[in-house]
Image: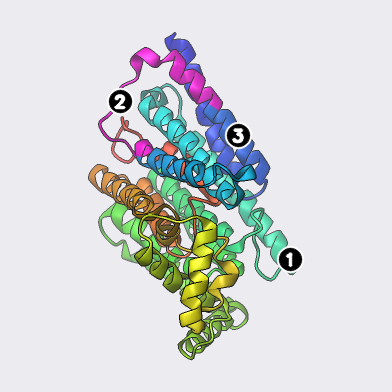
Amino acid sequence: MEKIGQRLYFISFILAILSIVFTLIITARQRELFYFSFYVAMFGLFIERKNIRLPKMDISYALIMIGLVKIIWTLVLYRHTQGYGYGDTQLDAGKKLVVGGVLIFYITQFSHYLTTFNYRQYLLAAFTMAFVLATSYGLFQIYHGIERIDLSTNRATIAAYIYSTLSILLIYLLIKLKQNAGYRIAVAAIIISSFLIIVMTGTRAAILSHLLLILLMMLFHFRKIHLKPLLIVIALVGVVGIASYGKYIKPKIEQTSTEIMLYQKGNDDSSLGSRFSLWRVGLEIFSQHPFGNTVEARQKQAAEIVAHDPKNQTALAYITSHLHDELLEAASLQGIVGLLTVLFFYGYILTKSLVQRNTPLLMIGCCMVVYGLTDVLLISAESLLFYMICIALFARNNPITPES
């Protein structure tokens, strides 16, 4: 039985990393591989049922709790609505969170099987392929004049957040393995090209955060600053920044300044202004209804709030979708219970990574927290599947070596 368990684990692991490869180029294939990995994991759990040890707390539990809250919320409030109406998005995300949590539990619970094959090389190969394919696709879109490249996601913001995290994890793998003397050149090339692609997505949160997150990753991993390589990277990034400043970066700075000024004057009809409105309205809704809402009730409450404060009227155009903030989205719909489950997940993943000195897990957590401030990564299918696979690959309960 051990041989069967070992082979099933290997198959599930390979399918999981292949899902990463297709995330930004063929989203349908990403989903298929994710679910195939889950099906194999379920079979593996059945085979290994006598060897399962349930820890008191696990990162998979945190994600499953978020998923169950979303599922229960939908079934309770939309049980009489055909197709669950506006609750269907939350239900779908909840089911994916539960499935992903089970997959994370399986891959981390039986991580001792990683010693049976060279998993580090598989990880490096998969993340390298994913990065090369995504970057090539991004350059293809740039060449064809797409104003804000979105890769295969149809949403430039989600593409930027996934691509940023993918790049950071690849840089970590290269630094960790140091296969040859050329790895420094590869790291520099990834930093430069990833920054260029992120600039071309036009996603301000990623443009501002990406390089800082890379710096945080290096500081946490090395526990000190290597001045020479840092200066070289800064110089190279500076060259890219100067080259793209006039056409891409400067307009974004001016746009941001203009949108903030307009919002302060009561005009929220802009990208940033609409977010400010959504956040203010969402916070007000939660303060008035801390135990949750339907999407329709949230929209009605938003209309009442805007009637008393018209400067946030643009929020009404987008509030049926989401609030562009992970915490506010959960709080305004699932109430304080939803808010606490997301906060618990954030706290647990960051604490676990710091205690274990697990650099990649820390970066996954930081990316989810930082980018979750301006979007809903736990609802978007592509980002949700991507981050859960990443957690499964790097949050091992039985690490072979520190940061292995």
- How crowded pointer 2 is (Cα within 10 Å; few <14, some 14-19, many 20+) is rated as few
Bounds of the magenta segment: 39-61
Q: Nearer the viewer, residue 204 or 194?
A: 204
- Disc 1 + disc 2, Cβ < 8 Å: no
Q: Nearer the viewer, residue 91 or 151?
A: 91
Q: Residue at x 72, y 60 (%)?
A: 140
The disc at residue 53 is none
Q: Which residue is mark 2?
A: 54
Indicate the quadrant where residue 119 lies. Answer: top left
* Residue placed furthest toward the front: 80
* Distance in Å between CA atoms under marks 1 and 2: 51 Å
- Mark 2: amino acid: Leu
Q: Main secondary structure of the magenta part?
A: helix
Tell me which numbered mark, 1 or 2, is placed earlier along the sequence.
Answer: 2
Vertical arrangement, residue 287 with respect to residue 33, above or below: below
Vertical arrangement, residue 56 with respect to residue 250, above or below: above
Q: Nearer the viewer, residue 396 or 259?
A: 259
In terms of secondary structure, where does tag 1 sit? Answer: helix
* Distance in Å between CA atoms under marks 3 and 2: 26 Å
Q: Residue at x 29, y 46 (%)?
A: 348
Relative to 102, is 24 on the left or the right?
right
Q: Which residue is mark 1?
A: 143
Q: Which residue is mark 3?
A: 33
Q: Quadrant of the C terminus?
A: top left
In terms of secondary structure, where does tag 3 sit? Answer: helix
**Mark 1 vs mark 2: in front:** 2
* Distance in Å between CA atoms under marks 3 and 1: 30 Å
In terms of secondary structure, where does tag 2 sit? Answer: loop
